[in-house]
RNA sequence: GCCGAUGUGGCGAAAUGGCAGACGCAACGGACUUAAAAUCCGUUCUCGCGAAAAGCGAGGUAUGGGUUCGAAUCCCAUCAUCGGCACCA
């Protein structure tokens, strides 16, 4: 006797069998236009997953959630007659591999290769219908050659404000092209993480710590490569409009871009007399969204790092200011914001002149004003700004009300819109009009202008790490210069020691021979950040083996084409990329679009976010909690079809939900019931196609449930409600389970519906039907998706609910053709209803045809 | 603090203005079996009146109000959980 646990159905034979068949016959390979077997009459559908970073831990059950959803859509769309592009690849550059390599001494190229193989094996075991011929990997020189090439396009362009788009740098007429390139070098205060030995983008810093590893991050000025994403702020904001993304994600991007409209106002510094204009009077330019509160400005604040500080501070205040600045410089961002709720600052000794009333107001230096936003200086309006109020109260500065709130609210501390008071130029005007009028006044008097500001910062693009794409740049006489396209790819030198230096000098600098590009030129030793490779991978998938171009023109036009602004028809991934990857990719895409390399202004038309899968204990899965579920274990026990179906049956895709092995078992039981609906076990213990399946017409009830299932599953795939689609298929199977004879036609239909969800089982049973009935239909992957017939769904009779005052009191069968009057009469005549209404006056009677009658008494 | 999402049985959920809890899990009972597993059939929101069952009645979708003949669903307020942003002028 075998001690092996008996499998509910032989998925362990079926699943490897079909995976081998798919590998051999390549039914999911999508040829490009012009290639063999390409069918130009079919419309295209590009369905994309966010490709994974292949970590050493392998897949966990969260990864395949979105992948299963897209696989269902891909298989469904193929059966609906689309050419489906459904690729997969590896985002393999980046910090974790390198951190691991430093720890273990194994080269990241080796661990990366191993991890990719592991991930691929795991994904193939789930039976996803990827076109593996299009597999890409961002660390492959054949791939990053083009990442570097795109960087060169960015480097060699500028954003022309007149045309509102990127143009080749050759069209720039100014003196210094380096000042306007979309990729530029700047000495900026950056997020330096000593532990990781690199700088990080704002987006990679969370609460003053590195997103990866949670190490402290400090501010430090360094020479860095930047990408001018701010030039695209307006378009990145406006063009969200045309995308089918969840509103929440659009909002996250809008907030991240953070557009605010207001005015820039110039405050001359007092005491710089300029008889005969021998010297320019220094002015402090501030940005405010509330120019209407200009009369309420009782002081100014400069950020500690503001360049005017040196110029205006008085002799006697200098020691205090210097001391304050040094202290502020040492603070991390965390200390400057989160921890420091108490306002600090120091008086500069200087005064500014308010342009609207010529008042002298003191200039302070305080770190609650950030150099990085607006002009790095503000006018303090304590009456109508919480922060300014707090500051003014602490340092005893005057507070002047200039906005009258509606109602009887206290004006001090009121930050909303009201009516301007104590403001001669705009007195009596509502805030919105006051803003316009004072801005106009400022423009007329040369003291300011309307202005728009963004929270979005330019993208810090260089990293002091080894495991990334080298920048295709050399330095000559202290100036940067692009390498020619013919020199790509720039391959990093083989390095024994790729640890961060700790000084901020990149590890590549250790490769002295490599760095020496020529007698006069040295190579740039910074590398690109991890986001670079994922900024354009969806384009490479269209034409992954092209060695002439980053993507062939025709392939790009076909797969990224269509009527909508975005090229990829469906993109599924986690919310965690809402402002990182999704913003960077849109930015690169727009640059490529402006330069004429791609055909649509946006990369991703429809975006769907899958929710996080929690552990069985309802906690986030993590190594430390020990609640990680590995797909391999689930598949060993229940098979991949059960795994796939359970992932979808758990609940709505977008929702966060806990894993449950019991739940997997339930779904496995369903698939076993499907198996036994078709198969029966012989005396010898062999499975054979059931004799109950015959070439007979389904009865009325069978016809109805079949067509109801076609309808529901189709609609549910379209609307991503996979859980309810599976429920409906369960209902169908339950309905057929004890039938005497099982009509072949209904079973064929059902298998086609089941196929996207449980493709191995559906393929196997389909093959068994083919073997017995020999009707020459081919594989299930070649079948057309069925359409439902509404006629089978309508009943002659419906159950009508009778309510009295909204409470259900009885039901009755009625013909669907019953008139409203007939329904009303029948309801009132109903004996059980009589009980409720005798002796009462019947008021209104609401009749909903085919559904209910509500009697109001 | 601001913005957003969510809140329904013992559990995952369904129903988005018309019978709350489809479907699945779990639990309980039955059939089959020497027995178990597996399978199949049935029961299961809460409370009250029934010896019990049938039956009858009342209540119930985070909390409190409102709109409506009718609300899980729409509106207002509150609470809780999760996510994002956070001195952004």
Image (cartoon, coloured by chain):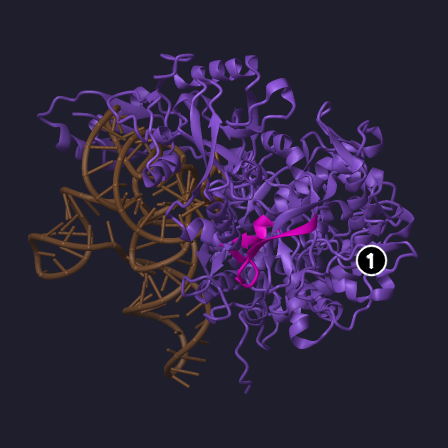
Q: Is residue A132 above or below residue A155?
A: below
Which of the 4 image quarters holds residue A451?
top right
Q: Is residue A837 above or below residue A40?
A: above
Say which of A141 and A190 sits in front.
A190
Say which of A843 and A732 sits in front.
A843
Within 10 Å of disc 1 (Cα), the crowding (few <14, some 14-19, many 20+) is some
Identified at 41% across, 23% down, the residue is A293
Which of the 4 image quarters holds residue A585?
top right
Residue A337: % across, % down: 45, 49
Left or right: residue B21 versus residue A162 is left
Asked which secondary structure carries label 1, the reply is helix
Q: Which chain is purple?
A: A
- The reply to whether residue A603 is in sight is yes
Counting every numbered tag in the picture gives: 1
Left or right: residue A394 versus residue B57 is right
Residue A438: % across, % down: 48, 16
Which of the 4 image quarters holds residue A594?
top right
Left or right: residue A20 versus residue A827 is right
The magenta-colored residue range is A201-224
- The reply to whether residue A753 is in sight is no
Where is the N terminus of chain A found, in terms of image quarters?
A: bottom right
Say which of A361 and B33 sits in front.
A361
Q: Which residue is mark 1?
A: A141
Q: Residue furthest bottom?
A: A1
Residue A713: % across, % down: 54, 45
Identified at 59% across, 26% down, the residue is A281
Q: Colour of chain B?
A: brown
Residue A477: % across, % down: 85, 49
Identified at 64% across, 30% down, the residue is A235
């Amino acid at each position: 006797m075998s001690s092996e646990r008996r499998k509910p159905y032989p998925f362990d034979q079926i699943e490897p069998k079909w995976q081998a068949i798919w590998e051999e016959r390549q039914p999911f390979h999508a040829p490009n236009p012009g290639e063999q077997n390409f069918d130009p009459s079919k419309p295209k559908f590009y369905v994309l997953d966010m490709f994974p970073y292949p970590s050493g831990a392998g897949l966990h059950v969260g990864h395949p959630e979105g992948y299963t959803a897209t696989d269902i859509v891909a298989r469904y769309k193929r059966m609906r007659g689309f050419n489906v592009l459904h690729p997969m690849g590896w985002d393999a550059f980046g910090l974790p591999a390198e951190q691991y390599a430093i720890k273990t001494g194994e080269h990241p190229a080796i661990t990366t290769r191993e991890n990719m193989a592991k991930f691929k094996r795991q994904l193939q075991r789930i039976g996803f219908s990827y076109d593996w011929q299009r597999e890409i990997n961002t660390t492959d020189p054949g791939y990053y050659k083009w990442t570097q090439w795109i960087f060169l396009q960015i480097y060699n362009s500028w954003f022309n404000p007149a045309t509102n788009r990127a143009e080749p740098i050759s069209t720039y007429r100014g003196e210094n092209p380096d000042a306007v390139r979309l990729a530029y070098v700047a000495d900026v205060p950056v997020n330096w993480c000593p532990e990781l030995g690199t700088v990080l983008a704002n987006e990679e810093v969370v609460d003053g710590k590195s997103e990866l590893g949670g190490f402290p991050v400090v501010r430090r000025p360094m020479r860095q490569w930047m990408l001018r994403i701010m030039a695209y702020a307006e378009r990145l904001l406006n063009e969200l409009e045309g995308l089918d993304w969840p509103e929440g994600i659009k909002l996250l991007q809008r907030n991240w871009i953070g557009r605010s409209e207001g005015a820039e106002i110039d405050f001359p510094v007092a005491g710089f007399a300029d008889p005969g204009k021998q010297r320019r009077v220094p002015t402090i330019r501030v940005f405010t969204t509330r120019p209407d509160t200009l009369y309420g400005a009782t002081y100014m604040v400069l950020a500690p790092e503001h360049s005017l500080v040196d110029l205006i501070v008085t002799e006697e205040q200098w020691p205090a200011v210097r001391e304050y600045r040094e202290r502020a410089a040492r603070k991390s961002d965390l200390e400057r914001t989160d921890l420091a709720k108490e306002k600090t600052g120091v008086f500069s000794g200087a005064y500014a002149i308010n342009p609207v009333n010529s008042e002298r107001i003191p200039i302070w230096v305080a770190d609650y004003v950030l150099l990085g936003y607006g002009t790095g200086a503000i006018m303090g309006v304590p009456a109508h700004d919480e922060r300014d109020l707090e500051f003014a109260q602490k340092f005893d500065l005057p507070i002047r009300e200039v906005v009258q709130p509606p109602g009887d609210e206290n004006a001090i501390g009121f930050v909303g819109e009201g009516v301007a008071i104590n403001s001669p130029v705009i007195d009596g005007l509502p805030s919105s009009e006051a803003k316009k009028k004072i801005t106009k006044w400022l423009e007329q008097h040369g003291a300011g202008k309307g202005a728009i500001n963004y929270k979005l910062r330019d993208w810090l693009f260089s990293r002091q790490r080894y495991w990334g794409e080298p920048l295709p740049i050399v330095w000559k006489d202290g100036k940067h210069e692009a390498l020619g396209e013919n020199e790509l790819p720039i391959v990093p030198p083989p390095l024994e020691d790729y640890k961060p230096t700790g000084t901020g000098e990149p590890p590549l600098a250790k490769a002295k021979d490599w760095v020496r590009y020529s007698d006069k030129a040295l190579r740039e030793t910074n590398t690109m950040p991890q986001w670079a490779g994922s900024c354009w991978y969806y384009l490479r998938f269209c034409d992954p083996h092209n060695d002439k171009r980053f993507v062939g023109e025709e392939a790009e036009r076909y797969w990224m084409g269509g009527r909508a602004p975005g090229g990829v028809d469906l993109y599924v991934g986690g919310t965690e990329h809402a402002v990182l990857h999704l913003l960077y990719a849109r930015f690169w895409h727009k640059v490529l679009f402006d330069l004429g390399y791609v055909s649509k202004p946006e990369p991703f038309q429809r975006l769907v976010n899958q929710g996080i899968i929690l552990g069985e204990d309802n906690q986030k899965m993590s190594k430390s909690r020990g609640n990680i579920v590995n797909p391999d274990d689930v598949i060993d026990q229940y098979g991949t079809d059960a795994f796939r179906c359970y992932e979808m049956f758990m609940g709505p895709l977008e929702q966060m939900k806990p894993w449950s092995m019991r739940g997997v078992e339930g779904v496995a039981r369903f698939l076993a019931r499907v198996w036994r609906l078709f198969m029966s076990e012989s005396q010898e213990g062999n499975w054979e196609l059931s004799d109950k399946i015959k070439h007979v017409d389904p009865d009325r009830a069978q016809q109805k449930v079949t067509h109801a299932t076609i309808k529901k599953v189709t609609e549910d795939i379209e609307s991503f409600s996979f859980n309810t689609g599976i429920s409906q298929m369960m209902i169908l199977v339950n309905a057929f389970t004890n039938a005497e004879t099982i009509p072949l036609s209904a079973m064929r239909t059902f298998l086609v519906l089941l196929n996207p969800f449980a493709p191995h089982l559906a393929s196997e049973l389909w093959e068994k039907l083919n073997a017995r009935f020999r009707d020459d239909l081919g594989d299930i992957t070649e079948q057309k998706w069925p359409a439902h017939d509404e006629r089978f769904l309508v009943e002659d009779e419906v159950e009508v609910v009778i309510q009295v005052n909204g409470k259900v009191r009885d039901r009755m069968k009625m013909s669907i053709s019953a008139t409203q009057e007939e329904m009303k009469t029948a309801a009132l005549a109903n004996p059980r209803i009589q009980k409720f209404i005798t002796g009462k006056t019947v008021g209104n009677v609401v009749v909903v045809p085919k559904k209910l009658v509500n009697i109001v008494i």
